[in-house]
Image (cartoon, helix red, strand yellow):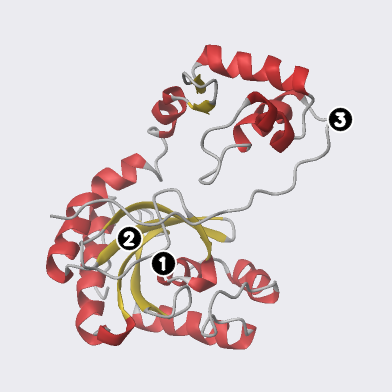
C-alpha cells in the first residue's frame, strides 16, 4: 500500500533584517511565522526573535498574540511549533488539501501501476511546492516531503509547470541563475528552452538525474476547469531502470484524470 514518507529538503529562508529594522506590524507578525521551516520546526523564543530579526521583547509580544489565536503552540520544553489553527486555514487553499483530495485516487492508481514514487506539486513563483507524494518501500530515495520546495528547472513536475507559464515568465526564469545539484542539472538557458518546447510538444516532462544521480522523473501537467495548468503529477524511478515509453502514458492518464476531477473538459482534438 502506498504510504507518505521521504527525506526532507532543507530550504534556507531569506536573511532576516537585523533587530530594530522598521517594518509594518503585519510584516513583523509574518516574520515570526516565517522563522519556522522544515529544518526549524521547533524554536525557542530567542531563536524566533533571532531568525525573524526582532528584539526579544517584540518577539515575546507577537508570539503571545499568535499563540492566543492558535497559530503557534508551546510544548512542555518551552519550544514553539506551528499551531493547528494554521493547518485548518491551509485546508481551505484550493491548491492544497482540496486539490490533494481530488487527486489522491488517481495518484494511488498511478502508484499501483508503477510501484514507484508518485508526486503532486504546484508552482509558487520560481519554485515547485510538493503537496502530496506516495512511495513504495523499495522505491528510489527522493529528497522531498510534503511542503518541500525545489527550483522549477530541476524536477519533472517543475519542468511541466514551467513549460506552461507565460512566455515572459519563462524567459525571465531562463535568464536567471539556474541552481545546480548534480553534474546533470540543466544550467544552460538555451538547453532549458529546448526542453520546455519538448514538454509542450509531447505532453510530458522528463528530468534525468538533475536532483540526484540515481533518479529520473516523468511528469505531466494537470489542468483546471479553465484549461490553465494548475499542478503537475510525476513518477520517480531509478535511473538505471527508467522505462520512459511505458511510464509516460500512465503519468498522462493520471494527469488527465485529475484534470477532469478539477472540471477540465478537453476539446475534440485533445
Residue 25 position, x and y percent, is 75, 23
Q: Residues within 10 Å of mark 2 (few under 14, many from 20)?
A: many
The residue where tag 3 is placed is: 22
The answer to whether the residues at label 2 and label 1 have Cβ atoms under 8 Å apart is yes
Q: Secondary structure at mark 1?
A: helix
Q: Which label belongs to residue 119?
A: 2
Q: Residue at x 41, y 46 (%)?
A: 95
Q: Is residue 41 left or right of residue 24?
A: left
Tell me the element at label 3: loop
Mark 2 touches mark 3? (CB < 8 Å): no
Q: Residue at x 45, y 70 (%)?
A: 155
Residue 129 position (above or below residue 168): above
Give the mark nearer the N terminus: 3 vs 1.
3
Marking on residue 157 = 1
Q: Give the x, y percent position of residue 146.
A: 39, 49
Q: Position of residue 250 (x, y in %)?
A: 20, 73
Mark 3 touches mark 1? (CB < 8 Å)? no
Q: Is residue 57 left or right of residue 125?
A: right
Marks 2 and 3 sit apart, C-alpha to C-alpha, by 41 Å
Where is the C terminus found, in terms of image quarters?
A: bottom left
Q: What is the secondary structure assignment of the residue under circle 2? A: strand
Q: Residues within 10 Å of mark 1 (few under 14, many from 20)?
A: many
Q: Residue 226 location in percent, x, y? A: 38, 54
Give the answer, above or below, for where 9 lies relative to 168. Answer: above
Residue 163 makes an appearance in the image: no
Whole-angstrom CA distance, mark 2 to mark 1, is: 8 Å
* Image quadrant in which you'd find residue 255: bottom left
Who is closer to the viewer here, 264 or 140? 140
Q: Earlier in the sequence, mark 2 or mark 3?
A: 3
Q: Residues within 10 Å of mark 3 (few under 14, many from 20)?
A: few
Amino acid at each position: 500500500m502506498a504510504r507518505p514518507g521521504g527525506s526532507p529538503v532543507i530550504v534556507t529562508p531569506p536573511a532576516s533584517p537585523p533587530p530594530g529594522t522598521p517594518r509594518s506590524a503585519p510584516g513583523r507578525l509574518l516574520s515570526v511565522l516565517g522563522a519556522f521551516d522544515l529544518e526549524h520546526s521547533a524554536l525557542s523564543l530567542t531563536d524566533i526573535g533571532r531568525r525573524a530579526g526582532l528584539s526579544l521583547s517584540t518577539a515575546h509580544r507577537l508570539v503571545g498574540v499568535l499563540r492566543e489565536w492558535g497559530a503557534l503552540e508551546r510544548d512542555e520544553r518551552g519550544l514553539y511549533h506551528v499551531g493547528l489553527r494554521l493547518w485548518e486555514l491551509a485546508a481551505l487553499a484550493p491548491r492544497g488539501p482540496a486539490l490533494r483530495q481530488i487527486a489522491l485516487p488517481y495518484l494511488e492508481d498511478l502508484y499501483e501501476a508503477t510501484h514507484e514514487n508518485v508526486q503532486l506539486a504546484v508552482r509558487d513563483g520560481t519554485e515547485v511546492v510538493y503537496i502530496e507524494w506516495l512511495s513504495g518501500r523499495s522505491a528510489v530515495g527522493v529528497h522531498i516531503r510534503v511542503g518541500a520546495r525545489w527550483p522549477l528547472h530541476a524536477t519533472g513536475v517543475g519542468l511541466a509547470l514551467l513549460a506552461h507559464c507565460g512566455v515572459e515568465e519563462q524567459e525571465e526564469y531562463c535568464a536567471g541563475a539556474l541552481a545546480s545539484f548534480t553534474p546533470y542539472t540543466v544550467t544552460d538557458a538555451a538547453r532549458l528552452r529546448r526542453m520546455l518546447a519538448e514538454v509542450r510538444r509531447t505532453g510530458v516532462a522528463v528530468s534525468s538525474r538533475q536532483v540526484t544521480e540515481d533518479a529520473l522523473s516523468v511528469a505531466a501537467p494537470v489542468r483546471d476547469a479553465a484549461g490553465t495548468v494548475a499542478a503537475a503529477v510525476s513518477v520517480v524511478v531509478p535511473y538505471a531502470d527508467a522505462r520512459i515509453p511505458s511510464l509516460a502514458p500512465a503519468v498522462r492518464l493520471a494527469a488527465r484524470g485529475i484534470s477532469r476531477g478539477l472540471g477540465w473538459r478537453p476539446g475534440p482534438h485533445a
